[in-house]
Image (cartoon, coloured by chain):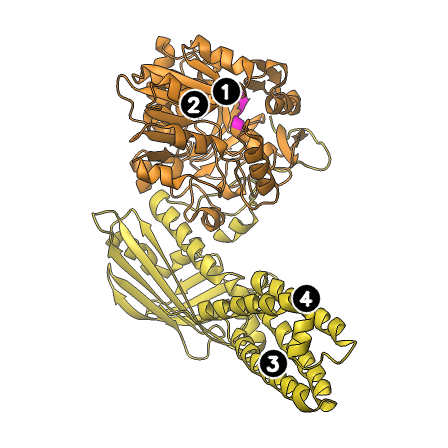
C-alpha cells in the first residue's frame, strides 16, 4: 500500500542532505560562494555566508535526525536568506546584479520546495490530533481454528481484555453495541457502534453510529494459515480524526504510536487465545486488564528498607 | 525480601524489595535456595544490554522450593524442589509446541520493544532487561515463576543443588551449542571461550562424538579446567588463533566452531579491539564480535559456526564473504532449555557430565556485588559464582 508519510519522510531527509550540501561549501569555499552570489565586493559578506553555512548544517542535523516538522526551520531560514539577498540586489549593478538575481531565483526555488514539503508534514497522521482519515492495520497468527478465533472476537464484550484503550463494550443484542474507552484523567469516552458485516469464521466489521464522538470503523479478517498452522488474523481500523478538542481526545486514545498499539493489542489477543490470559510481568498493580500492561516493571527497591511482609 | 538490583553500569547492590506475589493462576512462587551469576549477567552489569533500569532484580540461573502455587498448576506441589529454566515459555504457542521454548511467542509482554531492535521478539527471560519482559530475576530470596506448569522441573532429593543448578541455563546452553553443530564421529570442534558455557560445550561435544576439542581462552584457571576435560587449550594471547587452529587440524580448520563468548570479546589484536570498543562505547555498534569473526574465518569449508554467546544488536566487519563462499552454516539461539532438562539430568546422574568443578566461589546473596566484581575481573581464580540467599 502507498504510504504518503513514507514519501514525506524521504523528502524531509533529502532536504537534510541538501542542507549539508549547501552548508559545507559556504564554510570551506566562502569566497567562491560570494562570487557566485555577486557579493564578493562586500567585506562583510564572507562572515554572513559562513553564518548561513553553519545554520545550514544545523538544518541538516535537525532534518536528518529530528522529527519531520523540523523542515519548517528551513522555511524560516529561506525567508532570512531572501531578505539578505533582497538587500544585496538593491545596491548592485551590472554583472554582479545578474549573479545576485540568479542566486535569489535559486533560493526562491529552494523556498518553494521547502514550503511544499513543510506543508506535507501538516497532513501527517500518527494520531497526533491532525484531522483527517487514519487507517491502521496489523496482523497476527493464532494457534486456533478460524471458527474459535472468530467466536471469541465476535463477542465484542471480550475485546477490552486485550485492547489497551477499551474499558468496556456492552452488546445490546440487535447488532448494536456501546463502546467505552479510557480518556485522559481517568475519564472515559463512549460511542455506539453497529455490526456492518458478519461472516462466521471469516470476517467481522463494525462502524460507529453517525454523530459519535469517536468516529471509527473496523474489520477483522480470519483466514487459515498455510499448512494448518492456525489462523491469520488481520485487523484494519479506520478513524476519522476531527480537528480541535475532539481530535486531541482521539489522538490521546490512539497513543503516540497507534500502529504499535494495534500490534500490541493483537499480541495480547494471541496470548488470550493461546494461553487463556494476558501475560503479566512483575511489579504490576492489581487488576488483570490490559491497561496495566504499560505500567509494568520488575520489583524495585523500596526507599525505606522495611522487612519482608509475609514470610 | 532481599534481592540483587542493578543500579548503574558496573554497580549492583542487595536491597530490600517487595516480595513477589501470584499474579496469575499459572504462577508459582519459588523460595530460592541456590542461584548463580551468569556470564550474560555481566553484559547487563556492564550496561551493554539496552532497557535495563535501575532497581531491576537480576538473575536467571536459580532453583529452590515451591512455596506458593496458582490454582491451575497441577503438576507441582508446595514443597517441591525445582530447577527453573531461564526462558519463560507458555507451552501453547507454535514455537513451544515445536520445542523452541526460547522463542515462545507469548511470554514477552514487552515484545514490541524487542521487535524494534530485532524484527521479531524472543521469549521473556527472568531478570534480563525490559526488552525481554521486565520479569524480576532470581538473585533474590523469592521469585515469581510464570507458566509454572511448563517450566520448573522437580529434581531428586539425592542430588545436591550444585549438581543440578546449572540445568537452568549454562549446561543446556553449552549442550545446545554442540547439538546445533550436528557433530559426527571424527569431527574436530573448537570452542571460543572456556568460561562456564564453554566448559559445558566441551563436555557435550565429547558426549556427542567429537574426536578432538580445542578450547580458546586466555584465563589460566579456565584453561586448566578444560584441560582436565581432555580439551586442547589454546591461549590466544600467546599465539595466532587462526594459524594455531590450522596447525592443529592438518590445515583443514575445525569442522565445527562453538562461540561461547558474546558481545564483550577481548582480542590480542589491539587495533581491532580498540576499533570495536570505541564503536561500542559510542553506541555505533552494540557488540565486540571478534570471537565470532575468528570462528567464521577458522571453521573448515562446509563447517558449522554455532553461536551461544549473547549478542544484543548490531555488529560491524562481519566476514560474510567467508560464510558464503565456503558453505559455512551459522546456527544460533538462546537455549531451548526445556527440551534438554530431562536428558541432561540423566547425564548428570550417570556421571557423564561434571557440573561442580567449575564453581570457584560460593557466597551468601548479601555478598553478590562482590561476586559480580570477582567474576567480571576474573579475580581470585574466579570461574563461577554460586549465591545462597539467607546464607
Question: What segment is highlighted magenta in the picture?
Answer: B34-39
Q: Position of residue B104 (x, y in %)?
A: 38, 39
Q: Residue at x 24, y 58 (%)?
A: A201
Q: Which chain is yellow?
A: A
Q: Secondary structure at mark 2?
A: helix
Quadrant of the frame with the N terminus of chain B: top right
Q: Among the chains, which one is orange? A: B
- Which residue is rendered at x = 70% and y = 88% of the image? A89
Q: Quadrant of residue A263?
A: bottom left
Crowding at mark 3 (Cα within 10 Å: few <14, some 14-19, many 20+)? some
- Report which residue position mark 1 lands on: B239
* Pointer 2 with pointer 1, Cβ within 8 A: yes
Asked if labels 4 and 1 touch by Cβ distance under 8 angstroms, the answer is no
Residue B243 is marked as 2
Which quadrant holds the C terminus of chain B? top right
Closer-to-camera residue (A306/B45) = B45
B354 in the magenta segment: no
In the displayed orientation, state which residue is furthest to the front: A95
Residue B239 in picture, x, y percent from top left: 50, 20
Query: What separation in Å lies between label 3 and label 4 (alpha carbons)?
Result: 18 Å
Find the distance from the CA under tag 2 to the CA under tag 1: 8 Å
- Judging from the image, mark 1 belongs to the subunit labelled B
Q: Which residue is mark 4?
A: A27
Q: Residue at x 56, y 76 (%)?
A: A118
- Residue B216 shows in the view: yes
Give the CA separation, mark 2 to mark 4.
50 Å
What's the chain of the residue with tag 2?
A: B
Q: Which residue is mark 3?
A: A107
Camera-side mark, 3 or 4: 4
Amino acid at each position: 500500500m502507498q504510504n504518503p508519510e513514507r514519501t514525506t519522510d524521504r523528502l524531509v531527509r533529502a532536504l537534510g542532505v541538501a542542507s549539508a550540501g549547501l552548508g559545507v561549501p559556504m564554510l570551506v569555499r566562502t569566497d567562491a560562494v560570494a562570487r557566485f552570489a555577486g557579493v564578493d565586493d562586500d567585506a562583510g559578506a564572507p562572515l554572513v555566508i559562513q553564518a548561513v553555512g553553519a545554520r545550514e548544517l544545523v538544518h541538516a542535523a535537525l532534518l536528518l535526525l529530528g522529527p519531520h516538522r523540523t523542515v519548517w526551520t528551513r522555511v524560516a531560514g529561506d525567508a532570512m536568506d531572501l531578505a539578505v539577498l533582497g538587500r544585496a540586489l538593491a545596491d548592485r549593478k551590472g554583472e554582479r546584479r545578474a549573479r545576485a538575481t540568479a542566486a535569489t531565483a535559486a533560493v526562491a526555488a529552494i523556498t518553494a520546495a521547502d514550503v511544499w514539503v513543510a506543508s506535507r508534514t501538516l497532513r501527517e497522521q500518527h494520531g497526533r490530533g491532525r484531522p483527517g482519515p487514519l487507517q491502521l492495520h496489523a496482523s497476527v497468527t493464532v494457534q486456533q481454528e478460524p471458527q474459535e478465533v472468530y467466536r471469541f472476537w465476535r463477542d465484542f464484550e471480550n475485546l477490552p481484555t486485550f485492547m489497551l484503550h477499551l474499558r468496556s463494550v456492552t452488546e445490546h443484542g440487535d447488532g448494536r453495541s456501546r463502546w467505552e474507552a479510557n480518556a485522559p484523567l481517568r475519564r472515559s469516552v463512549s460511542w455506539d457502534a453497529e455490526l456492518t458485516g458478519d461472516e462466521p469464521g471469516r470476517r467481522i466489521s463494525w462502524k460507529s453510529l453517525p454523530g459519535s464522538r469517536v468516529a471509527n470503523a473496523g474489520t477483522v479478517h480470519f483466514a487459515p494459515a498455510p499448512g494448518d498452522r492456525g489462523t491469520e488474523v488481520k485487523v484494519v481500523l479506520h478513524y476519522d480524526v476531527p480537528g480541535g478538542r475532539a481530535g486531541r481526545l482521539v489522538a490521546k486514545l490512539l497513543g503516540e504510536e497507534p500502529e504499535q498499539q494495534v500490534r500490541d493489542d493483537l499480541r495480547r489477543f494471541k496470548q488470550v487465545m493461546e494461553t487463556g490470559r494476558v501475560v503479566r510481568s512483575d511489579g504490576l498493580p492489581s487488576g488483570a486488564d490490559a491497561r496495566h500492561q504499560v505500567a509494568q516493571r520488575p520489583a524495585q527497591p523500596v526507599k525505606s528498607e522495611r522487612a519482608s511482609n509475609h514470610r | 525480601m532481599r534481592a540483587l538490583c542493578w543500579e548503574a553500569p558496573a554497580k549492583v547492590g542487595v536491597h530490600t524489595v517487595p516480595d513477589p506475589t501470584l499474579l496469575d493462576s499459572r504462577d508459582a512462587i519459588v523460595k530460592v535456595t541456590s542461584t548463580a551469576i551468569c556470564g550474560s549477567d555481566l553484559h547487563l552489569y556492564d550496561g551493554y544490554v539496552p532497557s535495563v533500569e535501575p532497581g531491576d532484580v537480576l538473575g536467571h540461573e536459580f532453583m529452590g522450593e515451591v512455596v506458593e502455587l496458582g490454582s491451575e498448576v497441577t503438576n507441582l506441589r508446595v514443597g517441591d524442589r525445582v530447577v527453573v529454566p531461564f526462558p519463560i515459555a507458555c507451552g501453547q504457542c507454535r514455537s513451544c509446541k515445536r520445542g523452541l521454548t526460547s522463542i515462545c511467542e507469548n511470554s514477552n509482554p514487552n515484545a514490541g520493544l524487542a521487535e524494534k531492535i530485532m524484527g521479531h521478539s524472543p521469549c521473556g527471560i527472568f531478570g534480563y532487561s525490559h526488552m525481554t519482559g521486565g520479569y524480576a530475576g532470581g538473585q533474590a530470596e523469592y521469585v515469581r515463576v510464570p507458566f509454572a506448569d511448563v517450566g520448573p522441573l522437580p529434581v531428586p532429593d539425592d542430588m545436591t543443588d550444585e549438581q543440578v543448578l546449572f540445568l537452568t541455563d549454562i549446561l543446556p546452553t553449552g549442550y545446545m551449542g554442540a547439538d546445533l553443530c550436528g557433530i559426527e564421529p571424527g569431527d574436530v570442534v573448537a570452542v571460543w571461550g572456556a568460561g562456564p558455557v564453554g566448559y559445558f560445550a566441551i563436555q557435550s561435544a565429547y558426549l556427542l562424538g567429537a574426536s578432538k576439542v580445542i578450547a580458546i581462552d586466555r584465563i589460566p584457571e579456565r584453561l586448566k579446567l578444560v584441560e582436565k576435560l581432555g580439551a586442547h587449550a589454546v591461549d590466544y594471547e600467546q599465539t595466532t588463533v587462526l594459524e594455531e587452529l590450522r596447525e592443529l587440524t592438518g590445515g583443514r580448520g575445525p569442522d565445527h566452531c562453538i562461540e561461547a563468548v558474546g558481545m564483550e570479546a577481548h582480542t590480542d589484536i589491539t587495533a581491532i579491539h580498540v576499533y570495536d570498543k570505541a564503536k561500542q562505547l559510542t553506541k555505533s555498534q552494540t557488540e565486540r564480535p571478534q570471537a565470532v569473526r575468528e570462528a567464521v574465518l577458522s571453521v573448515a569449508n562446509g563447517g558449522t559456526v554455532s553461536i551461544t554467546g549473547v549478542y544484543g544488536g548490531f555488529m560491524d566487519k562481519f566476514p560474510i564473504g567467508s560464510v558464503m563462499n565456503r558453505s559455512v552454516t551459522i546456527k544460533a539461539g538462546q537455549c531451548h532449555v526445556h527440551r534438554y532438562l530431562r536428558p541432561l539430568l540423566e547425564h548428570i546422574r550417570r556421571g557423564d557430565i561434571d557440573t561442580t568443578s567449575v564453581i570457584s566461589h560460593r557466597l551468601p546473596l548479601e555478598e553478590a556485588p562482590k561476586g559480580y566484581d570477582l567474576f567480571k575481573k576474573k579475580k581470585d581464580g574466579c570461574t563461577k559464582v554460586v549465591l545462597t540467599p539467607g546464607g
